[in-house]
Image (cartoon, rainbow, N blue to C red):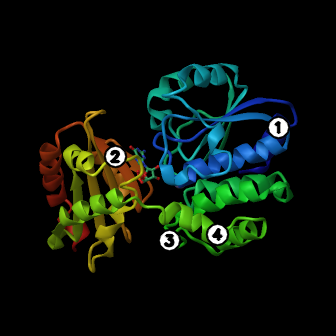
Amino acid sequence: MNLADISTVKSILSQPQKIVIIPHKNPDGDAMGACLGLYGFLKGMGQNARVVAPNDYPKFLKWMPGHDTVVNFEWDNGEAQRLLDEATVIFTLDFNDFSRTGQMASVLEGKEADFIMIDHHQQPSDYAKVTYSDVSMSSTCEMIYNFIDFLGQTDSITADIASNLYTGIMTDTGSFKYRSTSSKTHRVVADLIERGADNMEIHRQVFDTNSPSRLHLLGVALSNMVILPEYRTAYITLTQEELDANDFKKGDTEGFVNYGLTLEGIIFALIFIENKDEGIIKISLRSVGDFSVNEFARKHFNGGGHDNAAGGRSDLSMDETLQQFNEILKTYKSTLNP
Ligand code: 5GP
Ligand code: MN
């Protein structure tokens, strides 16, 4: 964020505002941590603020400080619409294009409020009065910490704010191991721990609260894994039937895609998950090294994200999607396995 942006934000926040904070659809730890961390900070300043999420988020995040104040656009549509209608300022966090909010996108298009985008994905759209976009950042939560720092207010980071921001940095860095994890990330995390984030407890809440059915589903996913050594690629499939048979709950498949990359020599991993309700196959893509899954998802599967972690979707059936994927893969042979 440049000096002009910082002074714009300072001037906006020097007045009482009606603020709505929005994560992307199917919010993850980083999106929720950023929204709830910023929510705590703005409330602490005396601002009127609410988080409005496009839809539900996983149970393993439903301990985060302030989570019980989140308005779900699907379930509490009237309240969500009212908050959006009255909003004078709208923060969009951990995404950079209205389309990432699903059903909410058409509502956001027409809004007069001042938009402030804070995000670390590639190719930001141009809708915000203030755009704080930095693809080198580990997480939007690290950027929220910076944002508070730019305003000279890190001393107002409470234990609740620290816990929310810690959660998003931890989940988006794969517990501090991805390439985007910098020495600065660790300094921020150290400060958050000093300010009251209970790192051991947060890790336990997010990773060690599995249900037996989730582990059974992981077993199914791993036995479905297809390994293509000639493409240094591994992919997993889960059909709606398999999800139903294992009592699937939102968030249960989080992290499954990463198992492909734990195989020696594999640099490209995917998971294809059928969603009969939405009539789509949701795809998660991961890579190590220079192969950009952002570009791959953008070009072939109506998605995007980061160089090493992206998402996308297909409107075809599972079989057709896999057939299409296998055809596309042939054109990447020399890139994936030179
Ligand atoms: P995940 O596979 O965990 O859902 O998402 C991986 C990364 O890609 C996240 O940063 C997420 O925000 C982004 N992402 C996931 N799905 C989509 C999508 O459909 N479009 C775009 N542009 N980004 C996505
Ligand atoms: Mn993120």
Q: Is residue 156 above or below residue 189?
A: above
Q: Is residue 289 above or below residue 309?
A: below
Label 1: how many Cα within 10 Å (few below 14, some 14–19, many 20+):
some
- Please name the residue that numbered disc 3 is placed on: 179
Q: Which residue matches tag 1?
A: 13
User: Upstream in the sequence, badge 2 or badge 3?
Assistant: 3
Q: Which mark is residue 199?
A: 4
Left or right placement of residue 284 versus residue 316 in this view: right
Point out the tag, 1 or 3, that comes first from the N-terminus. 1
Q: Under tag 1, what secondary structure? A: helix
On the image, numbered disc 2 is attached to which residue? 312
Q: Secondary structure at mark 3?
A: loop
Element under disc 4: helix
- Return the disc, 4 or 2, that comes first in the chain's sequence: 4
Q: CA distance from mark 2 to mark 3?
A: 22 Å
Circle on res. 62: none
Amino acid on which the number 2 mark rests in the picture? Gly
User: Could you say where residue 123 lies in the image, as x and y percent from the top left?
Assistant: 49, 46
Asked if the residue under mark 1 is in contact with the one under mark 2, i.e. CB atoms within 8 Å, the reply is no
